[in-house]
Image (tube, coloured by chain):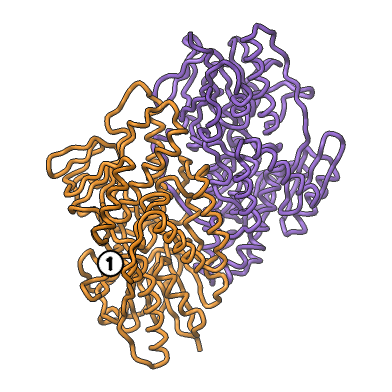
Chain colours: A purple, B orange
Amino acid sequence: MTRPRVVVIGAGFGGIAAAHELARDPVDITIVDRNNFHTFQPLLYQVATAGLNSADVAFPVRAIFRRQPNVTFRKASVRGVDWERATLAVDEGSDIGFDHLVVAAGATTNTFGIDGAEHALPLYSLRDAVALRNHVLSQFELAASQPDAVVDGQLTFVVVGGGPTGVEVAGALVELFDQVLRKDFRSLDMSRAVVVLVEMRDDLLGSFHPPSRRHARETLASRGVDVRTGAVVDRITPAALHLRSGAVIATETVIWAAGVKADSLASVLGVEVGAGGRIVVGSDLTIPGHTGAYAVGDIAEIPGRDGPLPQVAQVAMQTGRHAARQIRASLEGASLRPFRYRDKGTMATIGRRAAVTELPIGLRLRGTLAWLAWLGLHLVYLAGFRNRISVFLNWAWNYITWDRGPRLILDTPPAHGDAPNDASEDAGEPPTESQRNR
Amino acid sequence: MTRPRVVVIGAGFGGIAAAHELARDPVDITIVDRNNFHTFQPLLYQVATAGLNSADVAFPVRAIFRRQPNVTFRKASVRGVDWERATLAVDEGSDIGFDHLVVAAGATTNTFGIDGAEHALPLYSLRDAVALRNHVLSQFELAASQPDAVVDGQLTFVVVGGGPTGVEVAGALVELFDQVLRKDFRSLDMSRAVVVLVEMRDDLLGSFHPPSRRHARETLASRGVDVRTGAVVDRITPAALHLRSGAVIATETVIWAAGVKADSLASVLGVEVGAGGRIVVGSDLTIPGHTGAYAVGDIAEIPGRDGPLPQVAQVAMQTGRHAARQIRASLEGASLRPFRYRDKGTMATIGRRAAVTELPIGLRLRGTLAWLAWLGLHLVYLAGFRNRISVFLNWAWNYITWDRGPRLILDTPPAHGDAPNDASEDAGEPPTESQRNR
């Protein structure tokens, strides 16, 4: 008699946590992802700002589960779910049958239908991050190739979104310019390179407390970022960003870090979705009407005490684990339990040796101490993958030396067999969100 | 009064050596390359066989010359040379004027007009290497997605070319299958994965001595490579390789390591070219009819004692340096000298801890000793770039642990501003050849 088949859609934080939780259970787990790797999203902005290489933040799923015999991996895009036959339709290979399903396909960039959104560069997947890095470095190469012709906006970089991601990118960009590119592009007047951070609300880091917000703003400003709050984007053209106020910022680089929406898979499952396209689930994470099916992480609208939980890595990890426990309970004939979120705090870096950290015990850190906490937390997360110390060392080395590969303008051809999800722009998007609020 | 302008086309071994040699001379050097990085080609086959990451073998040119103030870098493709006005026409930015010119644009894959060449995967540039790696890994993902359907040739990998490159790739592939992928793809019967090495001549490594050739052949065979010498490729289809003998090998992967020809730039300069499109130069490396212009490395047909010198990294480095010295001599009013090649030996790895090395003093090494020499030589080469110890450590770590990033199937978008050279297939090809005979 075959063991119960657990299928997990998505190898992000949620999917990996679910599969890992069931390591010793008598089930056969199949993880499905359109990429053969997990992306460590908290560090994507580092790839985007030439601080780390792609390989420093991507982990082959097969390697992650090498020592977990009950896991099988399928590299495939999920086209849909046949609830009656309890199978997944995929783009490559045979249908995948399931007895229990965990939908953990994550989210994607949301540009809210803004006019000219196609001119903005998203920062959600590894592919996005590499494209962004190539673009930023190329702008400097372009400027260097015509030292006497100053093209307005050529070296102006606008980041839209004042949440943790936007703050991190803006801070990392100015560091890249001041500390690295200045030496690489000796003939360029680096004062021409400008970073503008645009936020709709009246302050950055809206989910943090006022002292943290102030610290972030002051730190960015002191490092030369032009912070503009209360600024709403009206439209984007190839040469400028237009604000609703009428102000126009000449720029050839608009980085979108201002919103996410559920992966389009959510819309083809024939289930109820809420705001941002997120799958509605019960407090026990089950998808209504579909016994044995759960949605976790960014793709799900998870009920919390004060409304739906934020789309952050912590939530993904905890709900992934909870869904796995629910599966275990149902196999043992026990009853399902509601999910209870444990907020372990939130962090945002503003650059090397600067960050804000807020822990639920009321402890708030700033500056270098916060940055060390951020570093330590990443070590813990990375070490959560067995045998990842080598990874961490490699990452730490790159981060500290900041010297080489990340500054490649490198294009590589489309991966063989990569079939983009119909409604999504990019092939290869990782399924889950970063651990910070957007 | 401005200093003499030395323009170097190509940031491969030849171009880098030339620019480096002139570090303290009173000249202004501009290096032009379509990529912003130098590719360490001897290790490209490692990227192709998922042993190293792209960033481990690519070095931003600006970083290489960070401490050499007389070097400027231009990321651009050279469209042609206006000899009368002594300027380069480039695809991006202003024309580049020169007083002295070093053409070091290297070579590219030569498929000799074989029928179906478009189905073969070249291995010359970093882009090629990544495409090859993606393809190889994807074949395994495909096979794993349909475990009950055995597609003939799906896991057969044919390498065409029994020179050092072909031998290295074949050896590295079987190692990848046996020691890494076997654990990653537990459900696959890895005995289905086959590597075939096809060589036109009667033996592998034709430029080595018989004992070395025998050792290479025996080692490969003992590791499971199907070595076929005296085998001439007739044509290639998407599902098979046809030999002139009539034999047909079912395969979806043909790796072309069997020939190079000069970069197409050579054909648009209006100068005489020889076999393989290589620029004819005098014994002093000057391009006939163009005072102050030199051709070095793979793009040049450099006269040696027994005919044109091979297209290997050693030759590129030595001729690059020599051209630089010629420039110095001409500036000092001294006479030009003929180039004399110093053969420092040749090496080929067959896998971890196996290699053949032949040094001109008659010393021939095999096995582990040869492999250590190979390792040591690479350290020397890598350390030749200032501050490259960190690079070497990183590379060594990846090589030894063999654990992570290299096994990504990762596609990244085209680099902004990358304009392929008109006659060449790939954007981003590095200009020079590997250090081994092909």
Image point 52% across, 15% down: which residue? A5
Task: Mark yes or no: residue A234 visible.
Answer: no
Residue B78 figure quarter: bottom left
Category of crowding for the residue at label 1, using alpha-carbon neighbours closer than 10 angstroms: few (below 14), some (14–19), many (at least 20): many
Residue B376 showing in the rendered view: yes
Does residue B280 sit above or below B422 in this rendering? below
Which residue is at a point 66% across and 15% down the rendered structure image? A326
- Residue A323, quarter of picture: top right
Residue sitting nearer the eye, A44 or A254: A44
Query: In x, y percent, where is residue B379?
Result: 49, 62
The residue lying at 51 percent from left, 30 percent from top is: A33
Q: Quadrant of residue A9?
A: top right
- B85 relative to B245 in the view: left or right: right
Residue topped by disc 1? B310
Q: Seen from this angle, which residue lies furthest left? A: B245
Q: Would you say B169 lies left or right of A133 here?
A: left
Query: For this view, does A168 lie left or right of residue B4?
Result: right
Q: Quadrant of the C terminus of chain A?
A: top right
Q: Is residue B125 above or below residue A113?
A: below
Identify residue type, mark 1: Pro
Q: On what subunit does the disc labeled 1 rest?
A: B
Q: Can you give x and y, in whole percent of width and height, for residue A375 in the image?
A: 72, 46
